[in-house]
């Protein structure tokens, strides 16, 4: 007749349950992390493609703009007014364009400001110094892309 000693207890099911819950929670948090990283990577790729598309659109605008500016610069005084009116319409159309990204928005705003300066310069009989519109777009996009992901408006 053997009696059980108080030190020998039956297996503890509570401990197993806790280990199982902790294991399931760990796996769930690991899966969530993987999904978040995948979604973040996809969003970065879509943003990069959208920035390239915005840049392509704005480069096309600048190319057309340069051709119209060259025509206005070489025109006689009577023709210049009509060409400047055309340039104003082109600048207004640039403002109506819908960028895909905040970087495209910044580049669009800077391009529009440069267009206004160019129009004002052409309207005067003694043109002033005007920055290259292409360089303005490129600089705006480059700076914006370099600052992507940073909280610049703290």
Image (cartoon, rainbow, N blue to C red):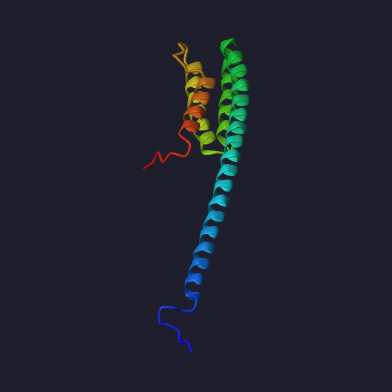
* Residue 52 in which image quadrant: top right
Residue 97 visible? The answer is: no
Of all residues shown, which one is farthest toward the front? 1
Of all residues shown, which one is farthest toward the bottom? 1
- Residue located at (57% from left, 34% from top): 51
Residue 66 against residue 46 in the figure, above or below:
above
The residue nearer to you, when weighing 25 against 3, is 3
- Residue located at (58% from left, 17% from top): 69
- Residue located at (52% from left, 57% from top): 29
Residue 150 against residue 10 in the figure, above or below:
above
Q: Position of residue 85 (x, y in %)?
A: 57, 24
Q: Position of residue 81 (x, y in %)?
A: 56, 18
The residue nearer to you, when weighing 34 against 112, is 34
The residue nearer to you, when weighing 25 against 95, is 25
Of all residues shown, which one is farthest toward the left? 154
The image shows a total of numbered marks equal to 0
* Residue 151 in which image quadrant: top left
Residue 53 visible? The answer is: yes
* Residue 68 in which image quadrant: top right
For the C terminus, give its image quadrant. top left
Q: Is residue 67 left or right of residue 106?
A: right
- Residue located at (55% from left, 38% from top): 101
Q: Position of residue 97 (x, y in %)?
A: 59, 35
The residue nearer to you, when weighing 42 against 23, is 23
């Amino acid at each position: 007749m053997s009696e059980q000693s108080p030190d020998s207890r039956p297996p503890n099911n509570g401990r197993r349950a806790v280990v199982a819950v902790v294991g399931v929670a760990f796996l769930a948090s690991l899966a969530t992390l993987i999904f978040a990283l995948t979604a973040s990577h996809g969003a970065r790729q879509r943003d990069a493609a959208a920035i390239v598309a915005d840049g392509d659109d704005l480069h096309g605008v600048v190319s057309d703009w340069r051709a119209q500016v060259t025509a206005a610069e070489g025109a006689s005084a009577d023709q210049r007014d009509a060409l400047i009116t055309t340039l104003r319409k082109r600048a207004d159309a640039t403002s109506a364009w819908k960028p895909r990204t905040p970087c495209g928005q910044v580049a669009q705003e800077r391009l529009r400001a440069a267009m206004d300066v160019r129009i004002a310069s052409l309207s005067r009989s003694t043109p002033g110094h005007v920055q290259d519109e292409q360089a303005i777009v490129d600089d705006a996009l480059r700076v914006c892309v370099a600052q992507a992901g940073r909280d610049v408006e703290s």
